[in-house]
Amino acid sequence: MKEIGYNRGSLNSGTCLILLFAGLLAGILFVQTLDASSFAGIFSEYFLNQYASLNIDYKRLLRYVGGYRCGQYAFLICCGALSAASVLMGGILFLLGMTWGTLISVSTVRLGLKGVLICVAGILPQIFFYIPAYGWVLMWVWKQGNNRKKYLFLAAVGFFFLIFGIVTEVYLNPLILQQILRKM
């Protein structure tokens, strides 16, 4: 077994949660500083009505989502192998929280509770595959693992979860979102 040969800083689950929630708070505060005219776009009634009746080109969507998610995963895997992994993962968690906070805040400002429902529907069911895919890499950093073979094995297993997440995001999630938008 090869050892990576460095000792990473500590990143535990409590620190990760603090960074994630600090990012959520930062995203919410960011939205509160903007004026109402900057909230046009994806959460407008016009866009949502168009999306509800859209014919989706699944092949193009698969190429786009697959490329985007695989790129994110490869970046995360590479970051997890660096000696500064805990700092990078902490920054990624903060930005993820900030993104979620901004998205939920804008949807709530534009659409109220309906916006929150759309956000939740937008991450289901693929989140059940993405959490293990990305979570194993994050847990590896938490535990300060240094066995390269085990890390690559976890990355490979996570990649299969990533593929299932991509498939559900492309083929199942648009159908769920369209059904919800048609009923609203």
Image: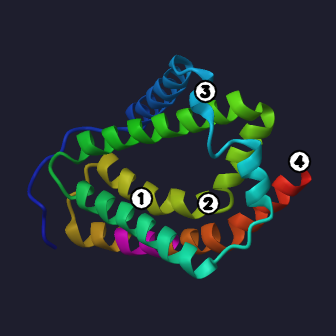
For label 1, count other residues whose C-alpha is less than 10 Å away and answer few (under 14), some (14-19) or many (20+). Answer: some
Q: Secondary structure at mark 1?
A: helix
Q: Earlier in the sequence, mark 3 or mark 2?
A: 3
Left or right, 6 with respect to 64, comes to left
Q: Which mark is residue 128?
A: 2
Q: Compared to 158, does 11 lie above or below?
A: above
* Separation of marks 1 and 3 at Cα, in angstroms: 40 Å
Q: Position of residue 13 (x, y in %)?
A: 42, 38
Q: Residue at x 21, y 68 (%)?
A: 148
Tag nearer the camera, 3 or 2: 3
Callout 3 amino acid: Ser
Tell me, yes or no, whether the two marked residues, 4 and 1, touch with CB atoms within 8 Å.
Answer: no
Question: Which secondary structure is most common in the magenta stretch?
Answer: helix
Q: Position of residue 54 (x, y in %)?
A: 74, 67
Q: Please say whether residue 170 is visible from this viewpoint.
A: yes
Magenta segment boundaries in residue numbering: 155-162
The verdict on residue 161 being magenta is: yes
The verdict on residue 93 being magenta is: no
Which residue occupies the foreground of this view, 183 or 47?
47
Q: Secondary structure at mark 4?
A: loop
Task: Report the residue marked by disc 3.
Answer: 37
Tag nearer the camera, 4 or 1: 4
Task: Report the residue marked by disc 4.
Answer: 184
Q: Residue at x 68, y 57 (%)?
A: 124
